[in-house]
Image: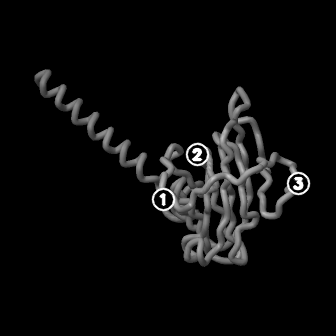
């Protein structure tokens, strides 16, 4: 094989890999329901999926928002307190935070999760009384959750904002349960 043919072959391989990487980056992975073929019970998407600037589910972070720590007593009803919290990096700049959320009676309970930008977030969402879904388009989540099952969703909160999440299988935010993921920017 001549050197020219080898170079052309390498260039073709590099171009194909680049195209696959771009497609994966721009189109987050849809997550199968737990127990569905190919499901591991844990949902995740490309952790660096871009946030759409013209998002209809992202707004500014409300003023005076406080990120709760493990063991905190929530001063606002509906704000999740992490069940597990640990240092996420050696410098202590980011945290790992784990939350449990139920969906029942057509509502997320609690309905607000507050974290710092850069934190690794672990949501364990249980559909208590019916089939539901957890959808947050800016982070690329659309995970169906069968009645009585728990879906685990893990991601790194890279973009700050107040992100609306909802049950798309219930008709979306206008007719089903909804809540907020608030990611507080680093100072």
Ranked by sequence position, the earlier of labels 2 and 3 is 3
Task: State how far apart marks 1 and 2 are (Cα).
Answer: 20 Å
Q: Do the residues labelled 1 and 3 touch (CB within 8 Å)?
A: no
Rendering coords of residue 54 (x, y %): 48, 56
For image coordinates 53% across by 55% down, the residue present is 138
Which residue lies under the disc numbered 3?
73
Q: Do the residues labelled 2 and 3 touch (CB within 8 Å)?
A: no
Ranked by sequence position, the earlier of labels 1 and 3 is 1
80 vs 56, nearest the viewer: 56
Depth check, mark 1 against mark 3: the one in front is 3
For image coordinates 65% across by 68% down, the residue present is 178
Does residue 37 lie above or below 85 as drawn? below
Secondary structure category for the residue under label 3: loop
Farthest residue to the top: give it: 3
Q: Quadrant of residue 130?
A: bottom right
Quadrant where the image shows the C terminus: top right
For image coordinates 82% across by 47% down, the residue present is 70
Tag on residue 159? 2
Rendering coords of residue 31 (x, y %): 51, 59
Which residue lies under the disc numbered 1?
30
Task: State how far apart marks 1 and 3 are (Cα).
Answer: 35 Å
Q: Are marks 1 and 2 in contact (CB under 8 Å)?
A: no
Secondary structure category for the residue under label 2: loop
């Amino acid at each position: 094989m001549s050197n020219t043919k080898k170079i052309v072959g390498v260039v073709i391989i590099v171009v194909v890999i680049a195209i696959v990487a771009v497609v994966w980056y721009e189109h987050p992975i849809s997550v199968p329901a737990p127990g569905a073929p190919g499901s591991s019970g844990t949902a995740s998407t490309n952790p660096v999926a871009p946030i759409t600037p013209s998002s209809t589910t992202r707004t500014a972070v409300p003023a005076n928002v406080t990120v709760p720590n493990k063991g905190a007593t929530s001063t606002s009803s509906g704000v999740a307190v992490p069940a597990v919290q640990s240092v996420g990096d050696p410098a202590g700049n980011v945290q790992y935070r784990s939350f449990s959320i139920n969906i029942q009676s057509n509502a997320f309970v609690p309905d607000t999760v507050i974290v710092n930008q850069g934190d690794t977030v672990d949501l364990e969402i249980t559909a208590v009384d019916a089939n539901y879904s957890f959808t947050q388009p800016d982070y690329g989540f659309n995970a169906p959750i069968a009645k009585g099952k728990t879906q685990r969703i893990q991601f790194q909160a890279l973009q700050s904002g107040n992100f609306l999440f909802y049950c798309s299988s219930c008709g979306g935010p206008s007719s089903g349960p909804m809540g907020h993921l608030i990611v507080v920017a680093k100072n």
